[in-house]
Amino acid sequence: MTRPYGTLLVANRGEIAVRVIRAAKAAGLRTVAVYSGADAHAQHVELADVAVRIGPTPAVASYLSIDALLAAAAETGAEAVHPGYGFLSERAEFARAVTDAGLVWVGPPAGVIELMGRKDHARKVAERAGVPVVPSLDLPSDLSPSDGALTPYGGDKSVFPVLVKAAAGGGGKGMRIVRDPEHLADAADAARREAGSAFGDDTLLLERFVESGRHVEVQVLADTHGTVLHLFERDCSVQRRHQKVLEEAPAPTISAQLRLRLCDAAVALATEVGYIGAGTVEFLVSGDEFFFLEMNTRLQVEHPVTEAVTGLDLVRLQLSVAAREPLGLSQQDIAVSGHAIEARVYAEDPYAGFLPQAGRVGLASWPTESARVDTALRSGDEVSTAYDPMLGKVVVHADDRDAAVRALCAALDRTVITGVPTNVGFVRTLVAGPEYAHAAIDTGWLDGDPAAKPYLRRPSLPDAAWGQAARAVLAEPRPAHTDEPPDHPFGVADGWRLAADRTPARVLLRAGDRTDFVPAADDADPAYEVLVGEDAVDVVHQGQVYRLERPDAFGAAGQHGVATDSDVPAPMPGTVLAVAVVEGELVEAGQALGVLEAMKMELTLTAPLAGTVALVGASAGDQVPIGHVLFRVDPAEEDA
């Protein structure tokens, strides 16, 4: 059969753009990349046969611009469009615009995207297909901001906890768990505002909240010839703020009978809606019960674990289905072999509420020999606040789950990213812990279970790391300000002199509030990796990066500026959305001072203590780096 397209435009960026471009090239297609002002030198741009700049850095003017993407397709002669995931991948208007332009859309029909993109409409499809749904409740029409007097449902607390969630969109936006009827009105107001801002639709649903549920999803695949298949299931229960952290296949806690029921339900739903292409049906599992959550009408971030255990290339199959070719597979042809786990690597600080981070990466070293790594991040790349903070995915495949856990720990040990805080060390510690080993982590565990708290505490710097850093600094040849080569005695500035020991006994290093003269002890541990820079030394151990500054012993050693308890620094790089106070204003502890936004997240900054605002360090609209002091509050004077 002659393929109806020969040139594919990938309407995305980052690791998914790289993934799709490579698969398309392997299929013999010509590839077109698109990029914003921030991504001119990105890896996906270099990999594609042709690249087109579609706008400035803000996504709304580039990756979310349907007109710009269609113009790029016309300019390059692209005949098909793959949306990846995120951005416009689940926007029916984009799918419709692509097909209206006479191009091939690599995904389900626009009508299916539209129908399944609304959780309320998707519930009805699931009910018609005989798929269980979470019991729903009527959202009271007389809700108003709670003042302690309004108690919906006549104060009956037996219906709680409930989940308020946006009917449109996903990603945890417009979603609130409510455990007390008096808080329902406030939660609904907040969810409605968030949903309206994120999706342009503030319609809400109210459902029973299933405690200790597990998130299990089924990969489905359908062609234009009537074949609808499942590729078994994945477990994605390890989440923070409704965002996935770890995914695995097969699901470790379900029986063979429940697996069959889940997969059959997913196929029934996909058949009912007339699905075409690759999609995912998400379920909430509690014991032997399961409930339909939603359908993702696109490729999932976690698709590599399904590829690992089935041996199938989902992107290649997407391209084949879009070309109207038959899948050439039956359900009996698909089987699971071994166990796969994927760890998402984010630019974020797990020990500060998972706040997103940004900046220039120093070293990016991935364990490519022992694991599959999907990423577009390279050493020296800039991580922008304009886009999602996911940097890549580390995927392992082994004979069984225990072996896969060990393999993932080993792979994360060899994952080194410096310059920008990441979650690598946190995930490595979590995977090695007993809760993950026993598959005891449910969707709410990281956000509220007391057993999760030790994993969320910032680890202290191991004593051995100081010795390792000192040894590395002492062994480093430091060029002198001479014309001699660096290996010449007079070409180094390390205290060398004739007839003397050229190795000083100790060096000055600083980490946080701790400053030490570190002895050059012979306590080498090969599991530590040390990277020496001009101003700092990074010590990497089990995915954690410990940064030690190298102050000037003859100058600035005693002048290191440290933020005080009165300062409110930016916890992440971003844009100041609002400033609520002025200098000289009296504030109470916890009072809102301003709002900072980055990577689709808003954070309200509050006063650390009662007192007087002594400094307002930014204005609304300012871009600020992490650590920039935005406010300073002088403590209130005690009465004499």
Image (cartoon, grey):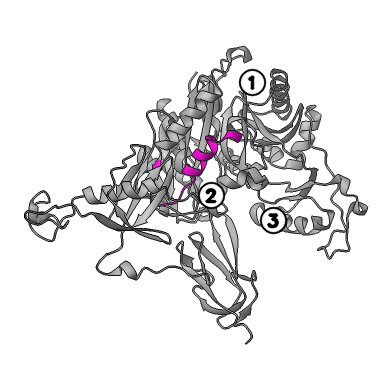
- Front-most of residues 365 and 19: 365
Tag of residue 229: 1
Quote the CA–CA distance across marks 2 and 1: 38 Å
Residue 350 badge: 2
Q: Which mark is residue 196?
A: 3
Crowd rating for badge 2 (residues with CA inside 10 Å; few <14, some 14–19, many 20+): many
Estimate the spatial distance between the alpha carbons at disc 3 and disc 2, rounded to whole Å: 28 Å
Asked whether the viewer can see residue 518, the reply is yes
Q: Nearer the viewer, residue 113 or 519?
A: 519
Q: Would residue 103 be seen by someone viewing this image from the given angle?
A: no
**Three-letter code, disc 1:** Leu
User: In which quarter of the view is residue 415 placed?
Assistant: top left
Query: Given this view, does label 2 or label 1 mark the residue nearer the observer?
Result: 2
Q: Residue at x 47, y 65 (%)?
A: 623
Q: Secondary structure at mark 1?
A: strand
The local crowd at label 1, few if under 14, some if 14 to 19, many if 20 or more residues have their Cα within 10 Å, is many
Which stretch appears magenta?
416-435
Mark 3 → mark 1, Cα distance in angstroms: 35 Å
Residue 208 pos. (x, y %): 80, 42
